[in-house]
């Protein structure tokens, strides 16, 4: 991405960047999913369009085996034709219906899954800020705090990207990350 800013926590680099997450080179990209892993619109739709229907098929198989993903939870599939190796599907809260703190859970669970898989890099979109209706500032605060608190305990993950789509999201996330990091 052209626009980005790096923050460091010990050995971990946290990069806030403007761009399209489906183009990002990272071991895993995180999807902003719903509990049924039915990837319709938003970033989920873009991931399936670019990565291929295999991502949707593996997602349905995951739900058949394990049941719906709880709010704040994650599921993993392959990444099809994307540059990433895995898609970690994270279910954020619907603002107004579920507490925004569940967004912190989603981030912590995605980072834990990346560690379990032994990955070194992971890229997050602004989970819950589209269809799920959370304001950028509140979402950024949840994400920044969860990443900052998890960073010292990470053993394999060395690079965490937060990829914002558009100027407004990028500027608002940057402001919050500068305050928290
Ligand atoms: N790269 C990075 N960010 C993107 C991209 C992209 N290519 N496309 C959109 N965004 P949303 P949610 C941003 O709605 O609110 C889906 O239907 C977008 O601008 O994707 O968690 C799922 O299947 C916004 O800031 O996720 C679920 O049903 C952010 O990604 C539901 O939406 C998240 O918006 C999940 O809603």
Image: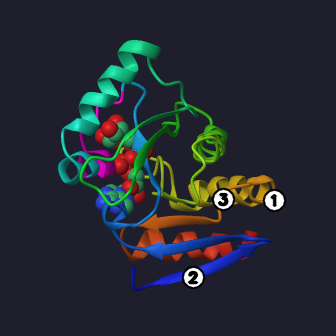
Q: Which residue is mark 3?
A: 141
In the rendered structure, the answer to whether residue 66 lies left or right of residue 98 reads left
Residue at disc 2, secondary structure: strand
First-in-chain label (1 vs 3): 3
Q: Quadrant of the C terminus?
A: bottom right
Residue occupying the point 57% across, 43% down: 117
Q: Position of residue 28 (x, y in %)?
A: 46, 53
Near mark 1 (Cα within 10 A), the count class, few <14, some 14-19 or many ≥20, is few
Near mark 3 (Cα within 10 A), the count class, few <14, some 14-19 or many ≥20, is many
Contact check, label 2 and label 1, Cβ < 8 Å: no
Q: Position of residue 131 (x, y in %)?
A: 36, 44
**Magenta run includes residue 15:** no
First-in-chain label (2 vs 1): 2
Q: Which residues are magenta?
A: 37-46
Q: Which residue is mark 1?
A: 152
- Number of numbered discs overlaid on the protein picture: 3
Label 2 – label 1 distance at C-alpha: 20 Å
Q: Nearer the viewer, residue 118 or 39?
A: 118
In the rendered structure, the answer to whether residue 134 lies left or right of residue 49 reads right
Residue at disc 3, secondary structure: helix
Contact check, label 2 and label 3, Cβ < 8 Å: no
User: Looking at the picture, does residue 148 appear above or below residue 146?
Assistant: below
Residue occupying the point 31% across, 29% down: 58
Identify the mark at residue 5; answer none if there is no mark.
2
Contact check, label 1 and label 3, Cβ < 8 Å: no
């Amino acid at each position: 991405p052209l626009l980005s800013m790096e923050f460091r926590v010990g050995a971990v680099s946290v990069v806030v960047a403007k761009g399209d997450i489906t183009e990002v080179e990272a071991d895993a990209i995180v999807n902003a999913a719903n509990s049924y892993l039915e990837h319709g619109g938003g970033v989920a739709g873009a991931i399936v369009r670019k990565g291929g229907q295999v991502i949707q098929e593996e997602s349905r198989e995951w739900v058949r085996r394990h049941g719906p993903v709880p709010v704040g939870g994650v599921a993993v599939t392959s990444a099809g034709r994307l540059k990433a190796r895995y898609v970690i599907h994270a279910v954020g809260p619907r603002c107004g219906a579920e507490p925004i703190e569940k967004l912190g859970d989603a981030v912590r669970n995605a980072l834990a899954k990346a560690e379990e898989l032994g990955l070194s890099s992971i890229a997050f979109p602004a989970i819950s800020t589209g269809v799920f209706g959370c304001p950028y500032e509140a979402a950024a605060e949840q994400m920044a705090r969860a990443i900052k608190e998890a960073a010292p305990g990470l053993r394999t993950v060395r690079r965490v990207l937060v990829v914002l789509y558009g100027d407004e999201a990028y500027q608002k996330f940057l402001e919050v990350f500068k305050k928290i990091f």
